[in-house]
Image: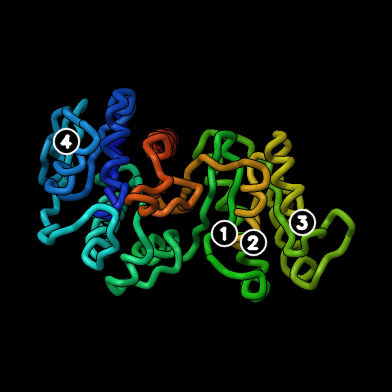
Amino acid sequence: MDKPVIGITIGDPAGVGPEVTLKAFKNKKLFNICIPVVIGDINVIKKSATIVGYNSEINLIEGTDQCKEGKLNLLSLNNVDFDYRFGSIQPECGRVAFEYIKIGIELALAGNIDAVVTAPIHKEALNLAGFHYSGHTEIFADLTKAKDYAMMLASEPLKVIHVSTHVSLRNACDMVKQERVHKVIKLAYEGIKGLGVQAPRIAVAGLNPHAGETGLFGDEEIKEIIPAVERAKQEGFNVTGPLPPDTIFLHCKEGKYDIAVVMYHDQGHIPLKLLDFMGGVNITVGLPIIRTSVDHGTAFGKAGKGTADETSMIKAIETAVQFAINRQGD
């Protein structure tokens, strides 16, 4: 089986993305599992290479047909013609970061690469550039015109998913409809199978923190979630719920479930933090996109540094390779 071609967007030129990418590829094992194509700018890469001490050869290409195995291939867009400064929030950096992602997604959809990994981008830089930042997954979905998608948070056991929309509980109550819940259950199933789990055990959370444990179901559980779960069961899915999200996450960590479907942003992230599920990657299920840094570190922190690091990038690329190989085997 051929090595998958993995595209890596360098993120915000003034952020940590370029540095994280080059630090990751100082680990030679990545060249053994994939053919990497960095999507960015030669000037940014040269500057970052000097900072992190990356001395290996970079193969400058104009198309993915020119990729070489064992080399870091660079598809250079040559559009960073402004005076960007590391650790600064600049509109132009937001603009080019968006362009890198757009081109990466276009290459993936066209079949020129097998998956795209995105390095950190900064929402303030995106907003200054005129791009509304609703969330990374929403940006990806908009660029691909996708209607059915979810954001999976994959940690070491690869067990956690929540719908991608970054909404409050109040808004979630309006959005949690039977058809949407059913679609997300199916996306969860497909996503975890893409990571190699052949018979996924799925848990679905209710909106009420006690739903399923003490029988305190609200209208949304009774009218929307329970019918969706029953429908999925009838279709042969191994699915349980609704259950309290904290209970589900604990059971996932203990190995009782392979994947948890929860309804809104904080419902996923709070239990993740409480149960120390951090340190994985984000996967946009339904799209060939893997994102680094599940701990949501920004591209900028003290002295221009953020919490994303090369470990997150390595894990994201390994996950992208796993998805690509499983798709090739289908």
The crowding category of the residue bearing disc 2, from other C-alpha atoms within 10 Å (few below 14, some 14 to 19, many at least 20), is: many
Whether tag 1 and tag 2 are in contact, CB under 8 A, the answer is yes
Q: Which residue is labeled 4 in the image?
A: 67
The quarter of the image holding the N terminus is top left
Residue 245 in sight in this render: yes
Residue 65 place in picture, x, y as percent? 15, 40
State the SS at label 4: loop
Q: Which residue is labeled 2 in the image?
A: 263
Name the amino acid, label 1: Val
State the SS at label 1: loop
Q: Which mark is residue 163?
A: 1
| 80 on left or right of 325 | left
State the SS at label 2: loop
Residue 113 place in picture, x, y as percent? 27, 43
Residue depicted at 21% across the width and 56% down the height: 85
Q: Distance between the residues labelled 1 and 2?
A: 6 Å
Name the amino acid, label 4: Cys
Query: Please, is residue 259 above or below residue 174 in the view?
Result: above
Residue depicted at 38% across the width and 51% down the height: 302
Q: Residue 204 carries which label?
A: none
Query: Please, is residue 239 above or below residue 325 in the view?
Result: below
Whether tag 2 and tag 3 are in contact, CB under 8 A, the answer is no
The crowding category of the residue bearing disc 4, from other C-alpha atoms within 10 Å (few below 14, some 14 to 19, many at least 20), is: many
Name the amino acid, label 3: Pro
The quarter of the image holding the C terminus is top left
Q: Distance between the residues labelled 3 and 4?
A: 48 Å
Instruction: Kindly indicate the quadrant of the structure image that contains residue 91.
Output: bottom left
Q: Which colour scheme is used?
A: rainbow
- The first of marks 1 and 4 along the sequence is 4
Whether tag 2 and tag 4 are in contact, CB under 8 A, the answer is no
Instruction: Kindly indicate the quadrant of the structure image that contains residue 230.
Output: bottom right
